[in-house]
Amino acid sequence: MIDSKHRNTALLVAGCFFMENLDGTIVSTAAPRMGAALGVAPTAIGLVVTAYLVTLAVLIPLSGWLAARFGPRRVFLTAIALFTAASLGCVLSTSLGWLVAMRVVQGAGGAMMVPVGRLMVVSEVDKPDIPRLISYVVWPGLVAPVIAPLLGGLITTYASWPWMFLVNIPLGAVAFAVAWRLIDDGPGRTAPPRLDRAGVLLTSTGLGALTWTAHLLSDRHARWTPVAVFGVLSVALLAAAARHLLRTEHPLVDLRTLRIPAFRASVSGGSLFWITVAAVPFVLPLLFQEAFGWSAVKSGTVVLFVFVGNIGIKPATTRLLQRFGFRPLLVTATVGVVATTVLCGFLTAGTPVALIAALAVVSGAARSLGLTCYQVIAFADVPQERMGHANTLQSTAQQAAAGLGVAAATVALRAGEWLRPGSAYAVAFCLLAVVSVGALTGAVRLRPGAGGAVMGVMPRSRPSAGQLQRGA
């Protein structure tokens, strides 16, 4: 049975997750208005998004060590305060440089806020309680990219761009007050090992280069030379980071956690799944506005039906997991995402809006079911002493995949324009569906009883060191 404190903590982290994800997606809608207000070209506003995403990617790997060193309560409160104060700084910005600087501070707060919050949610609870707690946390990450087009359209149409950041201030103040009363550092903690500085340098620069590569790919006017340079650099740095993290005694992030099959499946398949989940809400509004000629408000309203599917399936998720287990649900969810993504490519301006809305609802339900399963199975077989490393690694992979989602969408559209200029969106949706096929392959290969510990059908004993070494 989940006690009220853990439930309330999960809801608090869910609210913070919503703020973080909304701020990563809403700015794109307001780029023309922001550019005019700040005296720069709309394309320059891309830096406002990229600065935020790069900072998240660079600092998330540090979150686990910071929580162990200073305590989760102190880090979580500091993160909320930083995020809220930076939101006020964004509201007061009068130049692009100042706005970008405030977004970096926002990213620093977000990089600590959600990973540390989620670690507090999954730590010190029985495995069978994890599915329901994670379901509270997951849905805001799905909702934010879906409602961002509508909210951004409403704000830019009826108000001014600073309102996008102003809404964070009362939300952040409430979150800080609730966290101050609710969160404690838990049982006595031991001092963490010395900070792995080489791991920080290699991992952070590699993730930063990867995120910048994704930004360049998402810019339709970017040249291929810098894309190739930063792409190669990111791969080289991340390869060096992996080599270092596997060899050092006390790594920043313990990659040996990937030897746990259920966790490995969550990181690999979940990342591919998340790329498609992040890409489709980006492409759909473009299809509606550029190809169908819809207004931003109408487009955002129809995309909002994805949110209806997200919420509609949520109350049944835990019962479905208990009834069928992870493998059947992951296969069903990935098939649903593949099918609905392909069908989006066949939409036309003459397709009834009700049919488009129904497709969005089904897509939202599949997205929600799949991501909840991937988030829960990540911690199903991880022993408590490795939970911090697993949480950091899973958070890092998720953030990287979310950043790559928009880049994948842009590349898919470019490929569609090159292959079939008159059917660019159809080609783009089909290419994005292929990414989900990779997740489907992993789901099919998952062993039938994977993650059974959180369903209460396996003993709650921790894997031995020998089992972890063998990948049991």
Image: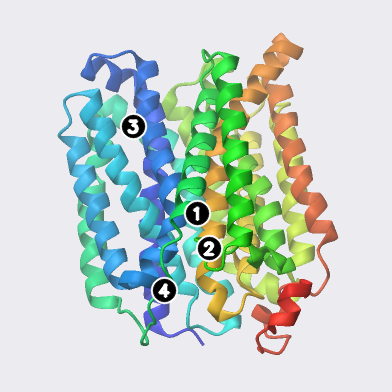
- Please, is residue 59 above or below residue 432 in the view? below
Which residue is identified by label 1?
A: 199
Which residue is identified by label 4?
A: 192
Examine the rendering and report whether any part of residue 197 can be seen: yes
**CA gap, disc 2 and disc 4:** 11 Å
Foreground: disc 2 or disc 3: 2
For this rendering, which residue is in front, 296 or 126?
126
Q: Earlier in the sequence, mark 2 or mark 1?
A: 1
Picture quadrant where residue 290 is located:
top right
Q: Earlier in the sequence, mark 3 or mark 4?
A: 3
Quadrant assignment for the C terminus: bottom right
Q: Earlier in the sequence, mark 3 or mark 1?
A: 3
Question: Helix, strand, or loop for circle 3?
Answer: helix
**CA gap, disc 3 and disc 1:** 43 Å
**CA gap, disc 2 and disc 3:** 46 Å
**CA gap, disc 3 and disc 4:** 47 Å
Q: Amino acid at mark 3?
A: Leu
Picture quadrant where residue 23 is located:
top left
**CA gap, disc 2 and disc 1:** 7 Å
The x, y position of residue 53, in whole percent, is 43, 39
Tags 2 and 1 in contact by the CB under 8 Å rule?
A: yes
Which residue is identified by label 2?
A: 251
Q: Amino acid at mark 4?
A: Pro
